[in-house]
């Protein structure tokens, strides 16, 4: 009888850990969307307030794990460097979170 109770308690702890990990991932997902919208709003506001004749554009496109960085404009070097840094950071976060999930699962 005690063995069954201990197994049930271990199962409950495992489920609680999985729920905690899932809620953290959901929070990161929502945070990502919020950051994208804040960035778009900042760009729109800057364009309206300081709308000059020159424009800079940069983008990162992920195809699987491989980032493709593109850009155009007079200051594109800084935008592309910033995009590469963001791409490397996002891959690093993905790997760290993947490793944490595997540790929880074991």
Image: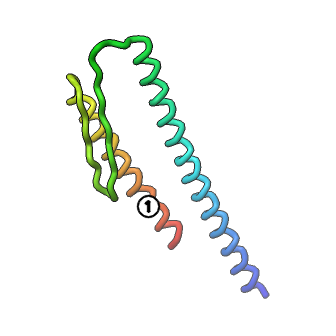
Say above or below: 68 vs 103. above
Dot 1, crowdedness within 10 Å: few (<14), some or many (≥20)?
A: few
Left or right: 33 as drawn, with respect to 83: right
Give the vertical position of 62 relative to 18 (above or below).
above
Query: Where's residue 16, x and y in %?
Result: 66, 64
- Decide if residue 39 is on the left or right side of residue 65: right
Q: Position of residue 29 (x, y in %)?
A: 53, 48
Q: Residue at x 43, y 11 (%)?
A: 49
Residue drawn at x 57%, y 58% as measured from the top left? 21
Q: Image point 63% across, 69% down: which residue?
A: 14
- Check the image and name the residue furthest to the front: 53
State the residue lying farthest toward the bottom: 1
Q: Which of 29 and 103 is in front in this view?
A: 29
| Residue under label 1 | 98
* Residue 39 position by quadrant: top left
Tag 1, which secondary structure?
A: helix
Q: In this view, does 84 lie above or below 78?
A: below
In the displayed structure, does residue 89 sit left or right of residue 106? left
At which x and y percent is residue 78? Answer: 24, 29
Residue in the foreground of this view, choosing between 86 and 19? 86
């Amino acid at each position: 009888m005690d063995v069954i109770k201990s197994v049930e308690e271990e199962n409950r702890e495992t489920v609680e850990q999985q729920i905690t990990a899932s809620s953290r991932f959901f929070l990161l997902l929502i945070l990502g969307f919020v950051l994208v919208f804040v960035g778009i709003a900042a760009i729109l506001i800057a364009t309206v307030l300081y709308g000059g004749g020159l424009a800079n554009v940069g983008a990162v496109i992920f195809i699987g794990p491989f980032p493709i960085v593109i850009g155009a404009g007079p200051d594109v070097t800084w935008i592309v460097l910033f995009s590469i840094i963001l791409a490397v950071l996002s891959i690093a976060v993905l790997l760290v979170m993947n490793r944490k999930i595997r540790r929880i699962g074991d």
